[in-house]
Amino acid sequence: MAGDENQKVPKIKKRRLLGVIFSLVSLLILTYISLTLITGREVVFSRIIGLFSQKAPIPLADSFDFDVGRNRVFADMGSFVAATGTLGIQVLDRGGNETLRDSLRMTNPVIASAGGHAIAFDVGGSSVRTFTESALSASLEAGGAVVSAAINANGWFSVCTQEGVAYRSIVTVYSDSGQSAYRVSLATGYALYAALSPDNSKLAVLIVTDGGSRIRLYDLSSEDPDYELDLAGRLVLDIRFLSGGGILAITMDSLMIVDTEGSENDFFGFDGRRLGGYTFGDNLVALHLLDFSVGHRGRLITLDSSGRLLGGITTDKAILSTSYSDGYLAVLYSDGPVFYDAEMNQYPPDPDHVAVAGATQIASLGGGAFLVASDHFANVYRVSTDSNED
């Protein structure tokens, strides 16, 4: 009898342990579902399953089959690649498997991403969609023609529109679930772009007027702006928030930092060259500066957000597209793609020439891979970033 009792004790302890594990798992699932419903998001059961399954990384496909119509544009979403076109949006994983699709008609589709969130919108139309790799976060029709839209890494987003009989500029901030959180109506000027700070607390609005550009900063807890920087006679093309709270602005003749008090500092001038194009990355800007001469001769340079020159090369080739991700810059020249690191060292140092006839876009996917695409194909190329390899 004593032997039987001794055998029962481990069985009872095992059942108790299994019960505790089951309770913890149930609590985890219920917490996820509750938080998801509270925030208005869709419950994605594949994520729950993924918590308890160890999957090997999906190898990168050699090409992606995007079926989103014409005028396709692409965005890197980490382990996923998103595209939008005249027929909708689509997300594929690294193996080329579809994880999300949404159909909508657009004339001038644009896409942007931050972290695991992306936004697609129709310039001149009204459609706006935000999404993760596997679910729509928000779907809305704006009250007027969409000029631009932006999203941050938390999934909050801003939309600039022209509304009403007088086509007044409106900037609306939305939460990650698509709820209106803040609204700015401009009495004068044209809201070209609006950026949200990483913590969802600040809104920077780029305004174009007959006399030049203005940058206006709002705190989302107050109606009045924190400051307005008037740049008379100068055209600002784009703005981004810096990690320290300042704003990086690109003009036709320089890079500029606007501090938290609204004072500007032109920290890198273009030295008489004209701006051919630019690409923002994490704490990096790549600039294509063209000489004022016949042809495409110019410089391709990279700088960090403090204005320090990281690297540069001289080129006389036409540049069709650039993209930066995960420490590497992908450049699509007229005769094919080339890959660089942040210091503009080419990888591999002596590459085999890759000719991609008809390509119009390039998207750096990080990890030594980039997507070269047109309206008819989307091919992936890998390069070695090990200079010791043959």
Image: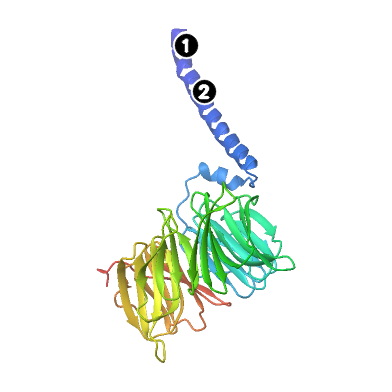
Determine which quarter of the picture holds residue 336. Answer: bottom left
Q: Is residue 79 left or right of residue 83?
A: left
Residue 390 shows in the view: yes
User: Is 43 placed above or below 100 here?
Assistant: above
The percent coordinates of residue 270 (x first, y second) are 37, 76
Q: Position of residue 194 (x, y in %)?
A: 55, 61
In the figure, is residue 220 to the left or right of 346?
right
Q: Earlier in the sequence, mark 1 or mark 2?
A: 1
Q: Residue furthest top?
A: 1
Residue at the spot x=62%, y=43% of the render? 39
Q: Give the label on residue 5, or none.
A: 1
**Identity of the residue drawn at 47% across and 7% down:** 1
State whether residue 345 appears in this view.
no
Give the percent coordinates (x, y) of residue 21.
Answer: 51, 29
Horizontal side of residue 225 vs 177, given as left or right: left
Image quarter of the C terminus: bottom left
Instruction: Determine which quarter of the picture holds residue 49.
Output: top right
Would you say the residues marked 1 and 2 are in contact, meaning their CB atoms lie under 8 Å apart? no
Which of these two is toward me, 172 or 63? Answer: 172
Q: What kind of element bears circle 1? A: helix
Q: How is the image coloured?
A: rainbow
Q: Position of residue 113 (x, y in %)?
A: 52, 60
Q: Is residue 352 above or below residue 136?
A: below
Specify few, some or many for label 1: CA neighbours under 10 Å numbering under 14, 14-19, or 20 or more: few
Within the image, what quadrant is residue 141 found in?
bottom right
Callout 2 amino acid: Arg
Q: Nearer the viewer, mark 1 or mark 2?
A: 2
Q: Nearer the viewer, residue 342 or 380?
A: 342
Residue at the right extreme? Answer: 165
How far separated are the C-alphas under marks 1 and 2?
Answer: 16 Å
Mark 2 packing: few (<14 Cα in 10 Å), some, or many (20+)? few
- Give the residue number, with chain letter if any, for mark 2: 15
